[in-house]
Each structure stands twice: as structure tokens, then as C-alpha cells.
């Protein structure tokens, strides 16, 4: 008999009932060190006092009105995002998947308004992940995401990751945009080199097409800058933000330049819940913390510490691990053993990590984890690796 919850997840046998900072407490009382943060969502950890205060205060006032009316918190958060980024305008959603849908619609509408409705093609890269909607799986391609869900939304081309030269050859009179994650998360913690992002921006400029960046996982301070593309010194035309911006409350945002968003007028897109007062109150609290220069500096410092210790872990367990990779607090261990075995051994040692493609184990901890948390995480990983190697 099918369970009451649709069985689309291979869930670990764990049930968490409380969170404190970088820690989750299981129903039986065990304390797990959370190095996954809800897959890069809990940017400020669990039960952060400023987020608790923001949502509690707003919950006592107003939860939902719909976008039939002005929402002051939404305007305030949009103003802050425009202030902190390249963008001129924002549309609020509830998830990264919804952001992908809008980003594709926006790019295609841009060309429709220019009198070139045939320009619907989107160039993407293998190994990418843009959510599980019709547009998201068509963009990413790959049998794991698309099998059984055809016919797929047409107009997407996938190129080999890192092959920027191939982008030039793939552009034709039907190309609307290129979409890319500056750091692939689900794809195995694969950062795109700064020079490749710079070249990609140049290619888009020379061909007059749009650049869409998916920073759902790598954005909101995850790499040590507010957004990952800042390391390369470029800006996109459209960017997808979610996960960390809500700190655990469902919230996504598509931000764009005035030119890229020009076709999105009243009636072209909408969301009942998107940008509601509760979500935007939390989003403002998150952004006010994460955008502080000293906060981002600490992310960079802790990134160096975590990287050093993960490389030590690789050296100590060469039969289990191959290399440490990643940037900021978006790290991965490429495994020689099964990455699922590593994740499961972590459960035995009360540490949570996240598997990814390319036999990688991901580390996406709260951005405000302590040095002691990092030390404890690596100590538990040593124990987990020893279980696998013996």
C-alpha cells in the first residue's frame, strides 16, 4: 500500500524535532551536527534569535494578503536586494524551482517584445540542476531527471561543463539566453572558473543574448561574497535566488535588470503566496545579517579552515577520499568509496552531510557555524571514514 506521504524521497531513518545553531536534535534525544543546513537553506543555522524574532513579530501582525495589494515587507526586501546587487527589479516566489520557471519565461518574453519570437533557445550545461519543474528538468537534461516525464519542454541545449568555447558554436538565430550555476551543487560541487564566467559574459555581450545565473544554492553568502558571480567581477541579466535567502522559510526571488525584465508587465506572471509578509520579514532579517562585510569575511575565514581540515581528512583516508573541492562554505569530498556509504557512516557518528553527483559528499553548513563546530565535524568524519576503511 502506498504511504500517505508520496514516496518520492529515499529518507534517512531520522526524525528531528528541534534545532539549535549548527545542531539538530533527533526525537530520541541524539544531537547531530548539521553540515548540510537543509541543503544550503539554513544560512544562519537553526532557531537564530533574529529570525525567530522577525517571524514571531510578523506572525502576530499579518501572514498573507496576496499580491492583489502592496506588501510593505516585500517592497523593503526588494529595495535591499536592488541596493546590494546588479538588479533593478525583483519578483518573489516560494522556491528555486519557481525561479527557474520565471527566468525562462522572462528570457523568452524579452525577445518576443523585441519582435524576435523565434528566439526561445536556452543553452545550459550538463550536470546542472535547476529544479524539478518542466522548465528546470528540460534545462538540466539528464536521464535521472527527465525519464518518464516527456515530452520535454523544447528549446534547451546542454553543453559539456566548462567547455566555454562550445557556447560560441551553439549560439544561433534562435538563442535567447545561457543559464549556468557559478558553482554546481547537485552536480558535485563544481565551481566554474572566474575566467570562464568572464568569457561567458563576453560571449553573451557579443551576441546580444541574456545571461541567467542560478545562484539558488551558491548565493546568499555561501561562497564568502553575497553572490558567487562577484568573485569573477561580472553581472548577469537575470539571477535566481532561493534557499539561503529565507533562512529556512520558503522564499525565492528572481532579480533582473530593467532591460531583461521589460516584457514582464501586469498579467504576465504571478504567485499567490510569493513575497508574503511572513517570508519577506524573514528574508529581510537574513539579508541584513549575511550582507554585512564582517559576516562575509568570517565566511571566507571559516572556509579556509574547513578546506584545510578536509584536505587533512583526504590525506588521512586515501582509500575513502580522493580530493576536497569547492569554494566558501560550499565544499565537497570526491570519494573513492561510495559517497552514500560515507553519508550513512556519518549518520552513525551523528553528523549530517549531503550526497551529490560525481560520487561527492557535500558540506553546506550554516554560514555562522563556529570553529569548534568545524573541528567537531572533521573529528566525526574521521571516525566515519575509519568505519568504511576497516
Image (cartoon, helix red, strand yellow):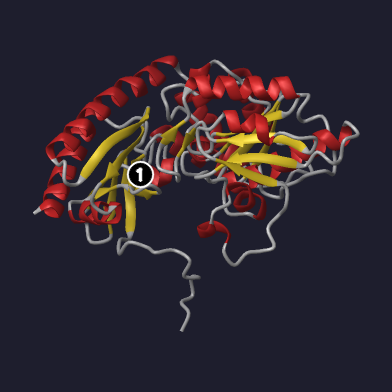
Q: Quarter-wise, where is residue 261 in the image?
A: top right
Q: Is residue 158 above or below residue 199?
A: below
Q: Is residue 387 left or right of residue 15?
A: left
**Residue 89 in sight from this viewpoint:** yes
Total numbered labels: 1
Q: Is residue 69 left or right of residue 252?
A: right
Quarter of the image where the C terminus is located: bottom left
Q: Position of residue 264 (x, y in %)?
A: 81, 36
Q: Is the residue marked by circle 1 packed among few (<14), some (14-19), or many (20+) residues within 10 Å?
A: many
Instruction: Using the image as rendered, state which of residue 161 and residue 165 is in the foreground.
Output: 165
Q: At numbered mark 1, what does the secondary structure look like: helix, strand or loop?
A: loop
Residue carrying label 1: 36
Q: Residue at x 68, y 25 (%)?
A: 204
Q: Residue at x 40, y 34 (%)?
A: 44
Q: Is residue 374 left or right of residue 12?
A: left
Instruction: Using the image as rendered, state which of residue 244 and residue 354 is in the foreground.
Output: 354
Amino acid at each position: 500500500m502506498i504511504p500517505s506521504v508520496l514516496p518520492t524521497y529515499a529518507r534517512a531513518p531520522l526524525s528531528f524535532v528541534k534545532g539549535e545553531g549548527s545542531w539538530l536534535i533527533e526525537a530520541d534525544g541524539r544531537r547531530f551536527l548539521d553540515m548540510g543546513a537543509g541543503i544550503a537553506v539554513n544560512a544562519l543555522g537553526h532557531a537564530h534569535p533574529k529570525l525567530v524574532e522577525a517571524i514571531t513579530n510578523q506572525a502576530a501582525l499579518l501572514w498573507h494578503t496576496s499580491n492583489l495589494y502592496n506588501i510593505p515587507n516585500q517592497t523593503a526586501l526588494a529595495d535591499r536586494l536592488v541596493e546590494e546587487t546588479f538588479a533593478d527589479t525583483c519578483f518573489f516566489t516560494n522556491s528555486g524551482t519557481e525561479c527557474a520557471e520565471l527566468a525562462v519565461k522572462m528570457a523568452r518574453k524579452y525577445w518576443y517584445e523585441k519582435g524576435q519570437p523565434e528566439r526561445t533557445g536556452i543553452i545550459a550545461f550538463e550536470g546542472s540542476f535547476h529544479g524539478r519543474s518542466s522548465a528546470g528538468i528540460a534545462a538540466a537534461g539528464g536521464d535521472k531527471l527527465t525519464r518518464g516525464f516527456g515530452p520535454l519542454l523544447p528549446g534547451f541545449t546542454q553543453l559539456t561543463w566548462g567547455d566555454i568555447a562550445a557556447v560560441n558554436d551553439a549560439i544561433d538565430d534562435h538563442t535567447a539566453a545561457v543559464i549556468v550555476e557559478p558553482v554546481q551543487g547537485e552536480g558535485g560541487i563544481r565551481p566554474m572558473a572566474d575566467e570562464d564566467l568572464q568569457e561567458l559574459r563576453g560571449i553573451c555581450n557579443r551576441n546580444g543574448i541574456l545571461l541567467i545565473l542560478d545562484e539558488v544554492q551558491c548565493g546568499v553568502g555561501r561562497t564568502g561574497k553575497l553572490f558567487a558571480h562577484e568573485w569573477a567581477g561580472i553581472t548577469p541579466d537575470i539571477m535566481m535566488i532561493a534557499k539561503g535567502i529565507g533562512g529556512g522559510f520558503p522564499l525565492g526571488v528572481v532579480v533582473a535588470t530593467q532591460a531583461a525584465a521589460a516584457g514582464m508587465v501586469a498579467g504576465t506572471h504571478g504567485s499567490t503566496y510569493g513575497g508574503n509578509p511572513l517570508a519577506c520579514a524573514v528574508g529581510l532579517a537574513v539579508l541584513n545579517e549575511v550582507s554585512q562585510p564582517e559576516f562575509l569575511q568570517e565566511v571566507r575565514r571559516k572556509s579556509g579552515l574547513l578546506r584545510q581540515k578536509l584536505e587533512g581528512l583526504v590525506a588521512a583516508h586515501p582509500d575513502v577520499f580522493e580530493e576536497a573541492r569547492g569554494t566558501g562554505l560550499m565544499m565537497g569530498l570526491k570519494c573513492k568509496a561510495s559517497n552514500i556509504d560515507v553519508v550513512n557512516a556519518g549518520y552513525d557518528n551523528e553528523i549530517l552531510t549531503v550526497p551529490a553527483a560525481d560520487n561527492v559528499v557535500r558540506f553546506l553548513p550554516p554560514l555562522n557555524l563556529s570553529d569548534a563546530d568545524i573541528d567537531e565535524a572533521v573529528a566525526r568524519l574521521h571516525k566515519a571514514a575509519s568505519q568504511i576503511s576497516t
